[in-house]
Amino acid sequence: MKATTRSLRALKGRRPLVCLTAYDAVTARLADAAGVDLILVGDSLGNVVLGHPSTVPVTLDDMLRATAAVARAKPQALVVADIPFALAHDTFPTLLRACRRLLQESGAEAVKVEGGATLAPAVARLVDAGIPVMGHVGLLPQRVHAAGYRRRGVTEADREAVLADARALAEAGAFAIVAECVEPALARRLSREVPVPVVGIGSGKACDGQILVFHDLLGLTENPPSFARREARLGDLAVAAIRRWAGKVRKEAAR
Ligand code: KIV
């Protein structure tokens, strides 16, 4: 059955949401065949697929193209597209136009924005315009140049700040919230106190769901984060297969 923001929101407290990134029709088809609930066309596209050092260089055009490819796979999972670097902090008409393009031209069914309470007014306006929004609190990879890749919720003040961010986004109408690299005790509190599903990454098991990067899960990245569960080593299998084929080509040519 086709997942919707409403069906996923209703899963809170009933069963965990399983979410995975995808960046093209192939990865989307594989994730969907495995029955994930939500496919995120993450701006991790930048470092995972495009070879950038971070998500910062990812553009709206990159996101439009990748989201369209994912949507062409016609997944049963909900397709969510990331809003790239700093766009959510631009003027509201610019943000609205970008969201409109992601939904109308690329086939996204929701967008995800990185940021906390300061984004809540914009999130409320997007939701009011009929654009479902997923929040993203905790470690914010788009802020790498401002704050680094810093685990969140280590001090009491920071725990309160992350909680306030998540509460504000839920109040603004976000249908779910990603909590990245927050202390497990804080993730547990977020899941208990925030009324929408809190989807963790590197935040322990006590969340309403989990999200991972496709290539980290399947062993296709060279330096996956330590929290990323690797369920296969497809990179090693690919190199071995290519080597086998190359050996056969060389051998056959030498005859
Ligand atoms: O871009 C991304 O892949 C993400 C997930 C890691 C949550 O934001």
Image (cartoon, rainbow, N blue to C red):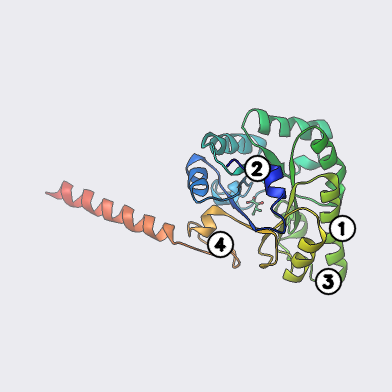
Say which label, 3 or 2, has the lower sequence index. 2
Between residue 203 and residue 60, name the one nearer to us: 203
Report crowding for label 1: few under 14, some 14 to 19, many 20 or more residues within 10 A (C-alpha).
some
Label 2, secondary structure: give it. Answer: strand
Q: Identify the residue at image location x=61%, y=67%.
A: 227
Q: CA distance from mark 3 to mark 1?
A: 14 Å
Label 1, secondary structure: give it. Answer: helix
Say which label, 3 or 4, has the lower sequence index. 3
Q: Amino acid at mark 1?
A: Ala
Disc on res. 155 = 3
Indicate the position of residue 36 as horizontal and vertical percent values.
56, 51
Q: Does residue 75 appear anywhere in the picture?
A: yes
Q: Is residue 143 above or below residue 76?
A: below
Between residue 206 and residue 182, name the one nearer to us: 206
Name the residue carrying label 4. 224
Q: Amino acid at mark 4?
A: Pro
Name the residue carrying label 2. 80
Whether residues under marks 3 and 1 lie with C-beta atoms below 8 angstroms apart, the answer is no
Q: CA distance from mark 2 to mark 4?
A: 22 Å
